[in-house]
Amino acid sequence: MILVVGEERRGRLNRASWEAIAAAQQLAAGRPLVVAVLGADIRAVALELAAAQVTEVVAIQHAALEPYTPDGYTAALEQAIVQLSPTVVVLPHTYQTRDFAPTIAARMERALVTDVIRLRISGENIAYARPMFQGKLTADVVPLGPAPHFITVQVGAFRADQASRGAVPAPVRSLSVSIDSTAIRQTPEAPFQEARQAVDLSQAQRIVSVGRGIKDAANIAVAQRLAEALGAELAASRPICDAGWLPMERQVGSSGQTVAPKLYLALGISGAIQHLVGMKGSKTIVAINKDPDAPIFEVADYGVVGDLFDIVPALTTALKE
Amino acid sequence: METLILWLLVLGCVGAFAAQVAARVRLIAAAQNTFSLDNFGSRLGRFLVDVVAQRSTIVERPLVGVAHAAVFWGFLAFSGYTTAEFLHGLGMVDLVHASGFSTYRAVLTPFAVAVLSGIVALLIRRVFVRPIALGETLSFESVVIALFIATLMVTFLLAWRLDEASLAGRANWWVHSLVILAFVVLIPASKHFHLVLSPFTVLLKSTELGNVPNLDFEKEQVGLEIVSDLGSKTVLDALTCVECGRCQVNCPAWGAGKELNPKTIILQTRDALLSGTRDRKLVEIYSDKVLWQCTTCGACENQCPVGIEHLPLIVGSRRGLVSNGEAPSYLGGMYNHLERRANIWGLTADQRQKFVESAGLEIFDPQKHDVLVWLGCAGGFEADFQKSLRSLFEILRVRHVRYGVLAKERCTGDPAKRTGNEYLYQELAKVNIDELQAARPKTILTSCPHCLKTLGSDYRKFGYHAKVVHSAAFIEELTRDMRPSPTAAGSVTYHDPCYLGRYAGQVDEPRELLRRFGATINEPVRNRENPYCCGAGGGLLFADKEEEPGSRISDVRFGQLRETGSATVVTACPFCSIMLKGARASAQAGPGARSSDADDLQIVDLMTYVNGQLAKA
């Protein structure tokens, strides 16, 4: 039997759990597959997981599992593994997993293969591919020793939408564990919250960015219309935000946000190095600038030397058609 | 009777003086010894010029400086007189009536007039002019001391007119003596203690500006975290501070309206030391905001007339923060870039390689090449600065200088060093030194003043002594025999980079080059050895707008340069160039932008300028 351990945090299922299920379904190839989820109140999450094509969902509910502590999780999961006796335990390679998986593998003296990106299955033999030397090499790792083997799968390596859903919901049963809350050594503080920016450009797929070539605050609308036609976020270089033509949070560059969209359209941006370092990770860079010597053309995949006030409206019209 | 009273008073006052001095000496002795007297010759020279001749006091504020010098020289002149009078009063030896004493007194008279004029001028300045450098509130103690000094001079002059034995004469003598005794008691706890300490502080000040010694990781040094981590020179500095505020008014961060005030840092250090809280965290004393606003331009340290070194304290405290993971987040990104890609931008080495190929650069070979050109992070990756380097290469080619570059270069570590990431700095430095030692260049030529300081000065602390030259000095020497036909280049404004003008003292070479190639030079305010920083140094190139209260330093400097009215600003540092261009862009887009004149203002690197003039000739 293959056991997947899903991840719940504050009543919500981590999407990476579905990726782990997808990996486990490949691995199970028809064999029994159980999904376990741990927490203080996990009924909703367990029902959500029941949509997967699995043998059953096991809900391990205990008050001492909230908030997450490595000691609490290790204790609960160890008891569950002993009761369910799986051959392989699959976990998503999240920060939480990174925290407790080595502990439980060491405590049970079982092999652990982390950050797995592919399964190499030939008959009964399974090797797990994982990156080494900062991704320069990929190693096929075969875990040795008695079952279960612990596997953590890299987030994004398996696709959540490829996890098969069952025709009918899988049965959900609860499994009781005992946790000695006095034996939990960690007292977690409130989770760290990244200062939330009103505009998160780092997640944008497409960005239309304006620079000093836009000349006047009133002309921002020209870029705005193109951004709407493209379904893109609007961004800017420093002088534009300094002048207050666009809010600070839309600034790209070393003193603003670092972005990596699929498409970065630079309108009238000369390409000062502080700006370039903020957008160099973009997949495709298109630059429109009057000055053929502008440094932005050094990094652009496509460059148009010309007046953005001719090109951008035409482009917007073309996109709308 | 009078003798007995004087004996009691002298013993009491000298005792009070000694007790206060002892408490301060103990603070210095308790600190880790950071005193050094290396380069003693140049230390002694500086002592004569700055202490005896009062140069650093006079240079920045001539009127105030001369007034101070009058008081200081008067003080020295009067020391014999005061000693003789006390020895006589105590009944020990009578030199007062010895032959020649009246001549000595006569000689002292013009001194007394000078001291009196000086101190009255200083008192008027302090009480009525009230310059911001002296603080926002009037120092009562300073007024008392000034009145004391005035009283000493008045009583000295009165003594000419009064019979020594008369009641008035005795009263006058006693007023004079009592003021001196009160002075002795007041000095150690006041800023006037500088008249005891500053000769030592000046002598012990490093001969190298911004000398922040390497950390020794073997000894588990991590930088300055708490008061008791402060070294003995820093403790001496704090006790010496005379609160003149030269550091404050010259600080570009303070000038741009930020919280950093170097004088405040020194006074906070002094107060913390005297209050005896040895385990107090430095960051709580100064605040982290203040510590990260320093561009390490060196103006404070360079202007200080009493030998205080601010940079070891500021960078040392930054080190303490960095080792606890408390660097600001914008530096985290830059450190990552340095760790992963060994350049400040985080760009990949192939982009430098592209430039190396397109500029036709050869890999340095000591048999083939005269100089090794160090490109630096700007030269390797920044398009505008690469244009300037192409100009440099063009000049070298015309003058038949053979040059090559390293196949692979890492950042010298300057931004890591100045921001207190000593570990990263040393890692980068060691690899660079290994490669430079293998390449064996006789001369390293760079166009970046930060690389100049790091390679040429900081790397000496690892035992690497190469001749490192900035392009301004190198090309100035190389083109000395050239007399290009004077093409009217018009007037240009030259902006001295801090790391070239103030740190390296190279202020004449760039000007000579400009003049040679046809320019008339407009000088901005704050120039030569005391320029106003562009705002890039000390890691602030990467600072967020949010981390910058007040104006941007670069905007302030850009305004000063624009005031000169030149159409062209020439500078000799890629980072000054980046900052000033950024400021120009902001000025063009900003509210009330005078886009026409800002557009017209060209910001040009010195090498581009020279090569452009050569091409015209």
Image (spheres, rainbow, N blue to C red):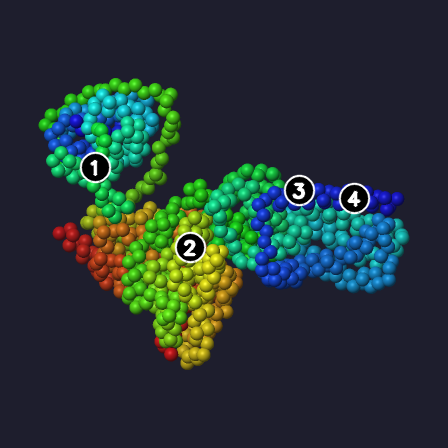
Q: Amino acid at mark 4?
A: Leu
First of labels 4, 2 by sequence position: 4
Determine which residue is flagged by label 2.
Answer: B429
To which residue does mark 1 refer? Answer: A142
Q: Nearer the viewer, mark 4 or mark 2?
A: 2
Residue sitting at the far left:
A167
Q: Secondary structure at mark 1?
A: loop
* Separation of residues labelled 3 and 4 (CA atoms): 18 Å
Q: Is residue B341 left or right of residue B519?
A: left
1 vs 3, front mark: 1
Q: Decide if residue B68 is in sight here.
A: yes
Three-letter amino acid code at the position of disc 2: Ala
Alpha-carbon span between mark 4 and mark 1: 88 Å
Residue A282 locus on image (x, y percent):
25, 51
Of the numbered discs in the image, which one, if any, rests on residue B23? Answer: 3
Q: Chain of mark 2?
A: B
Query: What is the three-letter code of the residue carrying label 1?
Result: Val
Mark 3 or mark 2: name the one nearer the start of the chain.
3
Give the spatial CA distance, label 4 vs label 2.
57 Å
